[in-house]
Image (cartoon, helix red, strand yellow):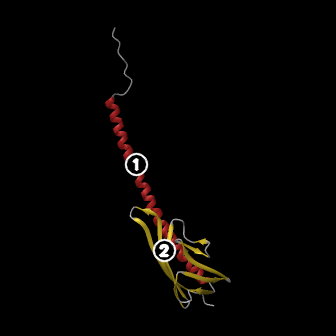
Amino acid sequence: MIRHKNNSGFTLTELLVYMGIFSIILVIITQMFVSILQSQLDTQSTSSVEQDSRFLIQRFIYDVQRASAITNPSSGQSSSLTLTINGQPYTYQVVNNNLLINSTIKLNSHDTNIQNLIFSRSGNTVSIGGTVISQIIKSSGSEVRNIITTTNLRPN
């Protein structure tokens, strides 16, 4: 009687084929994952800059139009803006790349920096100009948006 040996396992060739196929699938999945993460960073960077830009412009217009007086700049340009709203002074200035009100209330998000902010005044007209820059670096570099707007002090 001849006994047949039961081979229940993988041959070296089968194991190498399986490992090769698994490696190819792993590389493809890793590339997809990296691409998805980069796309998310790009979207988050653009979104942060756009959202902060719109908010800063709208807040500036809202506050100037409800102010009873502008004490700084009295005319010309300045790196800060001081408004009197309901008898209280509100000073807007950039400190450490953040736009602050009265040195305590931060107006931009933690994902953006504010640079080159200038307030200009001519009579009852006030303008703001500056740059909002994303701290999230996307594949093509930082997202940058220049903001500029003009509004008038409310009539008395």
Disc 1 is placed on an element classified as: helix
Residue at 62%, 72% (x, y): give it. 104
Q: Position of residue 5 (x, y in %)?
A: 36, 17
Out of 103 and 83, give the one closest to the viewer: 103
**How far is mark 1 from mark 2, CA to CA?**
37 Å
Of residues 41 and 115, which is closer to you in this image?
A: 115
Estimate how packed mark 1 is, as few (under 14), some (14 to 19) or many (20 or more) residues with alpha carbons within 10 Å. few
Q: Secondary structure at mark 2?
A: strand
Q: Amino acid at mark 2?
A: Gln
Which of the 4 image quarters holds residue 92? bottom right
Q: Nearer the viewer, residue 156 or 93?
A: 93
Are dots 1 and 2 in contact, CB under 8 Å?
Answer: no
Residue 101 x, y percent position in the rendering: 60, 75
Give percent across and percent down for residue 152.
Answer: 55, 86
Q: Is residue 124 left or right of residue 17?
A: right
Residue under pointer 2: 115
Packing grade of label 2 (10 A; few <14, some 14-19, many >=20) is: some
Which residue is found at the position 53% from the left and 71% from the top?
96
Question: Farthest residue toward the right?
Answer: 87
Residue at x 36% of width, y 28% of height: 10
Picture layout, residue 3 above or below residue 10: above
* Residue that appears at 43% across and 66% down: 142
User: What residue type is disc 1 on?
Assistant: Thr
Instruction: State the image quarter where residue 41 is shown.
Output: bottom left
Q: Nearer the viewer, mark 1 or mark 2?
A: 2
* Location of mark 1 (residue): 30
